[in-house]
Image: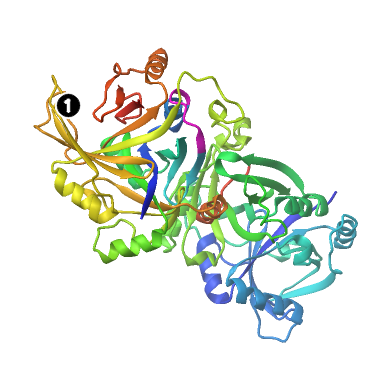
Amino acid sequence: MSDFTLDHVVIAVQDLDAATEDYTALLGREPSWRGEHPKYGTKNTLFRIDNTYIELLSLGAGKGDKRWAGELSRFFQNSGDGLYALALGTSDVNAAVREARDNGLDVLDPSDGEGVDLISGARRQWRNAQVPLKSSNGARIFFIQHKSPPDALPVAATIDGVGAGAPSGCVKRMDHAVVLSADMEASRRVWGEAIGARLALDRTFPERNTRILFFRLGDITVEISGGAAQSKEGVGKPDRMWGIAWGVDSIDAACARLAAAGIETSGPRPGIKPGTIIATVKGPQTHGVATLLIEHTAESFRPESREPHGMAYDNAPATADRPQARAFHAVALDHVVFATADLEATAAKWAATLGLPVTETGTIDARGARPGFRMAKLPAGNAFVELVQPLQPPTSTIQPPAQGMFSMSIEVDDLDAAVRDLRAKGVLVSDPAPGAWPGTRTAQVNKQAANGVPLQLLQRS
Amino acid sequence: MIKKVHHVGVVVRDMEQAMRFYRDVLGLPVHKIEILYEQGVKAALLKVGDSEVELLEPVVADNGVARYLEKKGEGLHHICFEVDDVERDLTSLKARGVELIDQQTRIGLAGRICFLHPSAVDGALVELCQPLPDDVVHAAQVAAAPHGESA
C-alpha cells in the first residue's frame, strides 16, 4: 500500500502578485515563501498550513523546461485560473513510482527539482514524478518526495489579529478537495487501485442524484463527486479539478474576517454533515477554485454524525419497486386557486402576461356561512388556474386573502376512501360534497394538517 | 408559451414533518430532495400525476423563503409553469415591461428558471422553468458549493 499524503495543492494563477494578495486575505496568512523554479520557467507563492501547503503557480520570466511552462500556458488558455494539481507526498518517490506502475498507472520517470526563495535566498530540493493526464483520468497528479527538511518551508504566519483565547478566523487546515467525475468507475480505479488511496466511502444518494467517493490521503479527503447513475456520455470523459474546503476554527470569525477584507461569502449555514457549519466563498479572490469554509463542531465528531447525511429521507413508501397497498391514490394536480378582488382585471393580467385566457366562468351562491363567489377557469396544460372573487366581504369564518395564491386541489381516484383513510390517520377532513365545478366531488383537508395549505381533494365522475 | 404546471411550491418549517403528510399520508412519491446552496433552502419535489408539489424549508435565516415563513407562516408560496424556452419568454416579458424578480434566468431545482414579481398577476408568485437534464442541474449545484463534507 502507498503511504501517500496530500503534500500540497497547486492553484494556477496568471497574475501571481494579485493572487498572492487575494490568498493572503482569503487564508488570513502571510506567504511562507515567494520563489521561482529556474528549471521549470515558473514562479510561485507558498502558504504552509497545519496539514498541507498551498502553491500558487504562475509563469516565470526565465527560459525553463518547455514541458512544465508549456503545460501551464495551455491550462491558462483553456481554463484561466483554477485548481491545477494535487501533489501526493511520499517518503520514497522511486518506490512509489514502481508500485504505481505495477498497479497499471503510467507515471513519468522521477526527476530532481529545486526552488529558490526570492526573499531569503533559501533553497528547497525535492524529487517528483508526474502522472500524465491520460493516465490519471484528467486530474493533474504528481508524486513528490522532499529532500529538504519540513521546516525549510515555514508555517505561514496568521494575520488574524485576534486576542488570546478568541476564536480564529484564519484557515487552519485543508478539509477536502473536490474532483468532479463523469466516469466514476474510471476515477475509482485511478485513486483506489492505481494510487492505492484508502476508499473511505462510496455512497449514492438517489434523491440528490449524487454519488460520492471519499479517498483518504492522510487526514485530507479527496472527494470524487458524480451523478447517481453512470451516463453513457460520461464514460471516458476526464475528471475536473473543482474545489477545496478549508477548515477553520470559527466560521463566524472567518466570515467576519473575510467581509472586512472585502471578500464575499454566503454567510454561515449548516453543512450536509450534521454538526458542521459551512460558508461558500464567492467572488474572484478564489481564482477559479470553488471554495468552501468548514467548521467542525463537537457534534460532527460523534459516531452517528459520521454517517453522511441524506439517508434520513426514506423514499420506501412510494417507490415503484416497493408498491404499498394504499386506500387511495393521488392521481393529478387538478387546479390551483388564486383570490382576487377584481376578477376581470386579474384575468386580463394572466392573459396578457402568461398567455392563459379564461375558458369558463361560474358563480357559486352564498350558502350558510360561506360567501358566494365568482370564478374563472384558465387551463394550463395538465391542470388549471382558478381565479375567484368573493361576492361579499369576507365573514368571520371565511377570510380568503384579497389577492394571491389561495388553495390547491388534488385529484384522487376514490374520494370516499381517501377521506376515510385520512381520518383514520388523524387528519381532519370535511365530508365529501359536490364541488364548485360540474362533475366533481370534493372534500377539504384541515389547513394545519397540510402545512398551512388549504388543500382540496377532488374526484371527477 | 406555457406547457403545464410544473409544480406548486409550499413553504414548510420542518421537512421531515411535512414529508409525513405529503409523502406518507397523501402518498406522493418523492422525486428529488436537494439542498440548494445558492438559495439557502432544502427542497423536495413530490410527484402528483405529471405535476409536482415542491416543499421548501429554509436552511438559512436571511433569504426570501425564511422571511416568508417568519411573516406568513407555512403555506402556498409559488406556482411554476413549464415553458419551452425560458430565455425567450423572459426576453418577451422584459420587452412588455412586466415586473420581474429575476432579470436573468438561473439554474434551480426544476431546471433553468426565472421568477416574475407577484404584482405581474395580482399577488401570485409565478416561476417559469425549462427542465434540464439532472446532471446539468447537479453540476450547477456543485458549482454553488462543493458539497459532501468529510464523513
Give the percent coordinates (x, y) of residue A316: 57, 28
Task: Give, as a three-letter code, the residue at label 1.
Answer: Ile
Give the percent coordinates (x, y) of residue A24: 53, 66
Q: Nearer the viewer, residue A120 or A33?
A: A33
Q: Nearer the viewer, residue A155 or A327?
A: A327
Q: Can the viewer see residue A124? A: yes
Give the percent coordinates (x, y) of residue A319: 57, 30
Residue at the image point whose x is 50% and y is 66% from the top: A285
Q: Nearer the viewer, residue A77 or A178?
A: A77
How many marks the image carries: the answer is: 1
Residue at the image point whose x is 16% and y is 43% from the top: A343
Residue at the image point whose x is 73% and y is 76% from the top: A68
- The local crowd at label 1, few if under 14, some if 14 to 19, many if 20 or more residues have their Cα within 10 Å, is few
For the C terminus of chain A, the quadrant is top left
Seen in the image, is A104 located left or right of residue A160? right
Q: What subunit carries mark 1?
A: A
Question: Is residue A246 within the magenta segment?
Answer: no
Seen in the image, is A39 located left or right of residue B141? right
Q: Can the viewer see residue A24? A: no
A204 is higher (above) or lower (below) than A79: above
B102 is higher (above) or lower (below) than A390: below
Seen in the image, is A36 located left or right of residue A27? right
The magenta stretch is: B24-31
Seen in the image, is B119 located left or right of residue A224? left
User: On the image, which quarter does residue B91 sit in?
Assistant: bottom left
Query: In the structure shown, which secondary structural element does the residue marked by tag 1 occupy?
Result: loop
Question: Is residue B26 within the magenta segment?
Answer: yes
Colour mode?
rainbow
User: On the image, which quarter does residue A202 sit in?
Assistant: top right
Residue ranking furthest to the left: A392
Which residue is tagged 1? A398
